[in-house]
Amino acid sequence: MFIGEYNHNLDDKGRLAIPAKFRAILKKGAVVTKGLDNCLFLYSKEQFEKIAQNLAALPISQSKARAFARHMLAGAMDVEFDNQGRVTLPEYLRKFSALKKSVIVAGLYNHLEIWDEHAWAQYKAEAERNSNSIAEEMGDLGI
């Protein structure tokens, strides 16, 4: 399970150290892709395969289904860990998420999110300001 918030730096080659506690979950391979809210999603290869199967099962006749499948699948890239526990984030994904030097790696149960530190701070502040109304809406979903 991925949980927690970690601050890391990208190096000049676009490499990002993944927190050591998560590397065991990702040892069989990892996939990074375009996420939502202008962040990146990093999945274990096994979890991403499940998501890809679900996306492939969406009705091809629906434009929103096609668009979301393209967003998640066409933007995806297999990543490998180097000896220092780093993955290289492709330039097109760094550009998509406007990653600069300082990034946040946030654990969200079955995947990691990778955010530009400034964008994360803005998102987090707004979410915390609206936490009561968000919680009320989640009640409608059974949470």
Image (tube, helix red, strand yellow):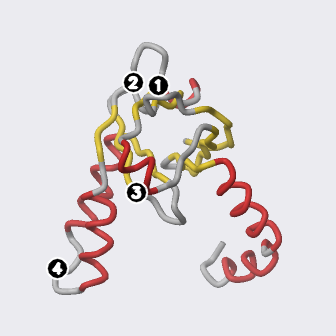
Q: Quadrant of the N terminus?
A: top right
Left or right of 74: which side holds 125?
Answer: right
Q: Nearer the viewer, residue 115 or 23?
A: 115
The residue at 67%/37% (across/down) is: 6
Please rate how many residues cluster around mark 3, counting C-alpha atoms within 10 Å: few if below 14, some from 14 to 19, many from 20.
Answer: many
Mark 3 secondary-structure assignment? strand
The residue at 59%/37% (across/down) is: 101
What distance separates the C-alpha of mark 4 from that of mark 2? 34 Å
Can you name the residue that lies furthest to the left here? 61
Q: Tell me the kind of residue under disc 3.
A: Lys
* Residue 11 pos. (x, y %): 52, 28
Q: Tell me the kind of residue under disc 2.
A: Phe
For the residues carrying marks 1 and 4, which lies nearer the camera in this image? Answer: 1
For the residues carrying marks 4 and 2, which lies nearer the camera in this image? Answer: 2
State which tag comes first along the sequence, 4 or 3.
3
Q: Which mark is residue 86?
A: 1
Mark 4 secondary-structure assignment? loop
Please rate how many residues cluster around mark 2, counting C-alpha atoms within 10 Å: few if below 14, some from 14 to 19, many from 20.
Answer: some
Q: Quadrant of the C terminus?
A: bottom right
Q: Which mark is residue 54?
A: none
| Vertical position of residue 134 compared to residue 83: above or below | below
Residue located beneath label 4 in the image:
60
Mark 2 secondary-structure assignment? loop
Q: Tell me the kind of residue under disc 1.
A: Arg
The residue at 76%/69% (across/down) is: 126
Residue located beneath label 2 in the image:
81
Q: Which mark is residue 34?
A: 3
State which tag comes first along the sequence, 3 or 2.
3
| Vertical position of residue 82 compared to residue 111: above or below | above
